[in-house]
Image: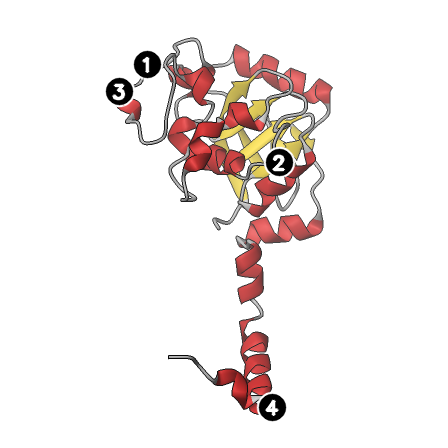
Amino acid sequence: MEKFVVHKGLVAPMDRDNVDTDAIIPKQFLKSIRRSGFGPNLFDEWRYLDHGEPGQDPATRRPNPDFALNQPRYAGASILLARDNFGCGSSREHAPWALQQYGFRALIASSYADIFYNNCFKNGLLPIVLPKSQVARLFDELYGFVGYSLTIDLPRQVVVKPDGSELAFEVGEFRKHCLINGLDDIGLTLGHAQEIRAYEAERLARMPWLDNRIL
């Protein structure tokens, strides 16, 4: 997966509490057997005025002009600012896939549902937790300034505001290591490829019948 070290990006608002995973990526899009292509349907029921189904051309849809992600000032945003309990509901991994494939690299909220929070790290998306008072202040600043951007420095564990002030956040060392080095579960396993090959060779030498194949 893509490494996350320092990222500067435009911020977009999701100014609601309790945004569940069905709102992030509605259930009809879970029919896909692929892990890609979910970005155009992120927040589908809020983002479009018509009902969406898999395989539709987004260019033929009717966008909701009142939805934040459809507003020109937030075009190209890569940091999503949310409220409390973001990602609640069912434990679909498609939710962080959709956010990431839309273009978001990081989320900032006062709290997340546990399973969604864990799924974000496994897919290279950084979910930052800040106190409600700091999140509220960020919303005020975001609405007050067009082009509002933040810099996220993961090694230092700080969010840097446009005025240079910093907001510290916590993240587990293992999760931090994985994001900085771009390691998902498969990448972590492949890091032990030499030991795995050595074990397989030693096991085959002891039990050569394991190499028998049915043709």
- Tell me the residue at 53%/88% (across/down): 209
List the residue tagged with mark 2.
Answer: 116
Residue designated by label 1: 62
Determine whether the residue tagged by mark 3 lies in a helix, strand or loop: helix
Q: Position of residue 72 (x, y in %)?
A: 37, 16
Image coordinates for residue 100, horizontal then vertical, percent: 47, 37
Please tell me the numbered disc located at residue 60. 3
Residue type, mark 3 in image? Thr
Other residues around mark 3 within 10 Å, as few (<14) / some (14–19) / many (≥20) = few
Choose top left, top right, bottom left or bottom right for residue 106.
Answer: top right
Q: Tell me, yes or no, if residue 161 can be seen here.
A: yes
Earlier sequence position, callout 2 versus callout 4 = 2
Q: Position of residue 154 (x, y in %)?
A: 61, 43
Q: Which residue in the protein does label 4 denote?
A: 206
**Pointers 1 and 3 in contact (CB under 8 A)?**
no
Quarter in which the C terminus is drawn? bottom left
Q: Is residue 120 left or right of residue 65?
A: right
In the rendered structure, which disc, 1 or 2, sits on the residue that comes first in sequence?
1
Image quadrant in which you'd find residue 194: bottom right
Q: Residue furthest top?
A: 66
